[in-house]
Every structure is written in structure tokens, then in C-alpha cells.
């Protein structure tokens, strides 16, 4: 089977589409499908006009350029029939026809892999738990899989690398691009200590739909998926749903149920996700089958922060608010009444004040101009 024709199929059919599986069921060799032309499309069954147009518009020359582009960038191209193609991915629906891999493709097979995912708007608690879990997983010998997005994903990769572990990043863009762009150095570190992978054309720009499409690969590569923080509706929750449908175990980190970033994890726990607070909690589920790869004793040597089960009560910080000057709007005043010394997300303030997102943004800007509040990392606000 020609690698070039596998690359052609990956370009000719929208990534994540069930059409790929239907084509390969009828034509196990993509070259046969390519040569069959219009009659091959008819044999596959019902194909939408847009899908047929895409297939017929994709040429071998386009596939050749994509293959050369990836190889010039230093990436390997693995087709479904390659011995190095991740075997766990072959178990899932809508498996990619090809993967572009930057780094060590051997970490995609054999080793126990756990996905650690979560919100882009990570809290300090979320950061701490991500470091505890992803760092512990990496130290013990598991591969940490995530999506290299800002927030929990990036923190998971970094914690695993800091612990000397291997990590895999699944990109929502082509392998030759980096998203977010500020993660270029992190991408290079991951490729040197694991792998960066993508199913999209090498130069494909990131699109919002691509991140949802790639989530099935994040969960499909993994034995289980650990959700650290997630909103009720989020890409992270989609990943958890995909994990369940793929027969993967879902883990969730309990957190403050009053926060919007905990709504998703709370729902997962209600629906049967296993509550976890450490890498040991997760790896205990796989020790019997992967004992030769896992060494829990290495986690203790890391000196990771411990979660206080009964923290000492502390006096809340003194809140001294400046008086409202003349001219402040009623909407801004309503928001100001909700801001204190604890960082609050803009959407949290907006909901509690009964304002729309646009009204809230304008009011927050007004309060900042008056010097009454200030923003802190994560688009959160405290009194000035």
C-alpha cells in the first residue's frame, strides 16, 4: 500500500468523518479507491455533494506536497497500516487515516497513557492539582496525553516534562503550525521528550471545529481521561463523553462546586466518573496490566505539593473598597458591589449582577478606568 495514497485519503476526506471508515471497509487499500474514481465513490454508498466534490478535487500532487512538507519539517507520517500507528486508535470509530508525528512515535504504543485535560481558565487550585497528577503520572512512567491548549493542557505537559516523563500533544491544527503560538518552545520540548501529533494537513491553520475533532484522538490514545477542571459545556466535557463511548475510564478531580470551572467535573462525578486526587489514584486502576512500566515509588521522590484535606482556617483578607465616585453607572455599581479581594471571573460577576456579557464588559472597563478594580491573570478581577 502506498503511503502517498493514505496521505491523499487524509486530505480528500474531512478529518473525523465516518466516511473514511466506510471507504476503507469497501477499499482496504486507498490506492484502489483513488483509481476507481467516480465508480468507487458510488460503491461506498451515500456521499454528500460536498464530500464528493472534496474527494474529486484532491489530487495526488496535493498529497505529495503535504508529504514532502511534513518530512521537510522533520515529522514522520504514519498510515493506518503502519506497524508504528497507535494500536489504541485503531479501536475507535473514525480513526484517522494518517498521523503526522513530530518526535518519538514509540511512545504512542505499549506504554500506559493517561489524558489530563481541563479548562483554559484554570484556577490556582486547578494548577496545583494538574501538577500533582500530571507530574506524578510522568514520574511513575505513564505517558501524559493532552491538547497543548492554554490552561490545564499546557500545565499538564509542563508538569510531566518537569518530572522527567514523556508526554504527547494532539494539535488542533497542522503539524507545521503551533497553537497557541506562544507554546512553540513547549512544542519543541514535547517533541524532544515525547511526541506532537496531528491528523490535519501539515499547514492547516487552527479552527474551532478542529479542536473538537481532535478530542477523539486525545481520548483514543489513552487508557483513561482525567478531567481537572471543566465548565458545564466545554471541549473538555466532549472529550470525557468520547472517552466513555470509546470504553475508556473517566476520572474527575473534585473541586469547589460554586465555581463555573467545576460544573463539568461535578456532572461527570454524578454520572460515574471516578474521583481522584493523585496520580496513584489513577494508576492503581492499571497497575495489574502495566506493572512492568509503572513505578509508584518514584512519585514520592518528586516532592510534589500535597493537598490539605483539612486546611487550617485563615482569616479572610481585609476588604477595603474605595467609595464610588460621582458619575459611575448603575451597572458598574452593581458589579462593584460583587468584587472583593478574591479574584472573580468576568462571567461569574456578570451572571450574579444580572448583566449581559456586553454590559458586563463595559461596566468592568468603566470600573478599571476609575481605578476601583484591577484585572489579574485569567481575566479575573479584584478590588484595586
Image: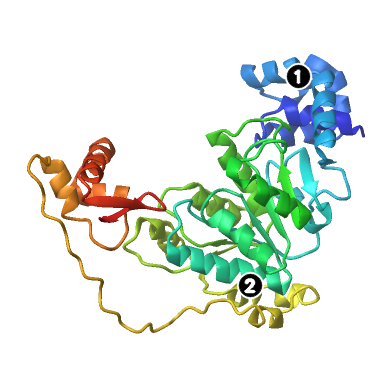
Local packing at callout 1 (Cα closer than 10 Å; few below 14, some 14-19, many 20+) is some
Q: Quadrant of residue 327?
A: top left
On screen, residue 281 versus residue 5, left or right, reads: left
The disc, 1 or 2, on the residue closer to the chain's N-terminal end is 1
Quarter of the figure that contains the C terminus: bottom left
Residue found at x 71% / y 74%: 140
On screen, residue 207 versus residue 76, left or right, reads: left
Mark 1, residue position:
58
Where disc 1 sits, the SS reads loop
Task: Farthest residue to the left: give it.
Answer: 326
Residue found at x 61% / y 49%: 147
Residue found at x 51% / y 47%: 235
Question: Which disc, if any, is residue 136?
Answer: 2
Color scheme of the displayed model: rainbow
**Picture coordinates of residue 33 (x, y %)?**
83, 25
**Picture coordinates of residue 282 (x, y %)?**
61, 72
**Picture coordinates of residue 348 (x, y %)?**
29, 52
Q: Can residue 239 be seen in this view?
A: yes
Where disc 2 sits, the SS reads helix
Classify 54 as above or below 165. Answer: above
On screen, residue 101 versus residue 376, left or right, reads: right
Classify 190 as above or below 224. Answer: above
Local packing at callout 2 (Cα closer than 10 Å; few below 14, some 14-19, many 20+) is many
Q: Can residue 248 be seen in this view?
A: no
Amino acid at each position: 500500500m502506498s503511503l502517498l495514497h493514505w496521505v491523499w485519503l487524509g486530505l480528500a476526506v474531512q478529518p473525523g468523518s465516518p466516511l473514511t471508515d466506510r471507504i476503507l471497509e469497501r477499499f482496504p487499500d486507498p490506492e484502489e479507491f483513488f483509481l476507481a474514481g467516480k465508480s468507487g465513490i458510488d460503491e461506498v454508498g451515500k456521499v454528500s455533494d460536498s464530500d464528493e466534490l472534496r474527494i474529486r478535487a484532491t489530487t495526488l500532487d496535493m498529497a505529495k506536497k503535504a508529504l514532502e512538507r511534513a518530512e521537510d519539517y522533520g515529522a514522520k507520517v504514519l498510515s493506518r497500516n503502519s506497524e508504528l500507528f497507535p494500536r489504541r486508535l485503531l479501536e475507535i470509530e473514525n480513526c484517522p487515516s494518517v498521523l503526522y508525528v513530530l518526535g518519538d512515535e514509540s511512545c504512542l504504543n505499549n506504554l500506559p497513557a493517561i489524558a489530563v485535560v481541563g479548562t483554559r481558565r484554570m484556577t490556582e487550585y486547578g494548577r496545583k492539582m494538574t501538577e500533582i497528577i500530571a507530574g506524578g503520572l510522568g514520574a511513575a512512567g505513564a505517558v501524559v496525553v493532552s491538547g497543548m491548549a492554554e490552561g490545564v493542557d499546557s500545565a499538564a505537559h509542563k508538569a510531566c516534562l518537569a518530572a522527567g516523563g514523556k508526554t504527547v500533544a494532539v494539535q488542533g491544527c497542522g503539524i507545521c503550525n503551533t497553537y497557541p503560538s506562544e507554546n512553540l518552545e513547549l512544542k519543541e520540548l514535547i517533541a524532544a521528550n515525547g511526541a506532537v501529533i496531528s491528523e490535519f494537513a501539515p499547514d492547516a491553520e487552527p479552527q474551532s471545529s478542529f479542536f473538537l475533532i481532535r478530542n477523539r484522538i486525545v481520548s483514543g490514545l489513552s487508557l483513561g481521561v482525567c478531567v481537572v477542571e471543566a465548565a458545564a459545556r466545554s471541549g473538555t466535557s466532549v472529550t470525557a463523553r468520547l472517552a466513555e463511548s470509546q470504553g475508556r475510564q473517566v476520572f474527575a478531580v473534585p473541586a469547589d462546586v460554586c465555581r463555573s470551572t467545576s460544573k463539568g467535573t461535578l456532572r461527570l462525578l454524578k454520572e460515574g466518573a471516578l474521583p481522584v486526587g493523585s496520580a496513584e489514584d489513577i494508576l492503581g486502576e492499571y497497575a495489574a496490566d502495566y506493572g512492568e512500566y509503572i513505578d509508584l515509588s518514584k512519585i514520592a521522590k518528586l516532592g510534589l505539593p500535597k493537598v490539605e484535606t483539612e486546611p487550617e482556617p485563615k482569616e479572610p483578607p481585609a476588604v477595603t473598597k474605595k467609595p464610588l465616585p460621582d458619575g459611575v453607572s448603575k451597572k458598574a455599581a452593581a458589579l462593584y458591589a460583587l468584587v472583593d479581594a478574591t479574584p472573580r471571573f468576568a462571567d461569574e460577576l456578570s451572571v450574579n449582577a444580572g448583566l449581559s456579557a456586553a454590559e458586563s464588559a463595559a461596566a468592568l472597563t468603566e470600573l478599571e478606568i476609575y481605578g476601583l478594580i484591577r484585572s489579574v491573570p485569567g481575566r479575573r478581577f479584584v478590588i484595586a
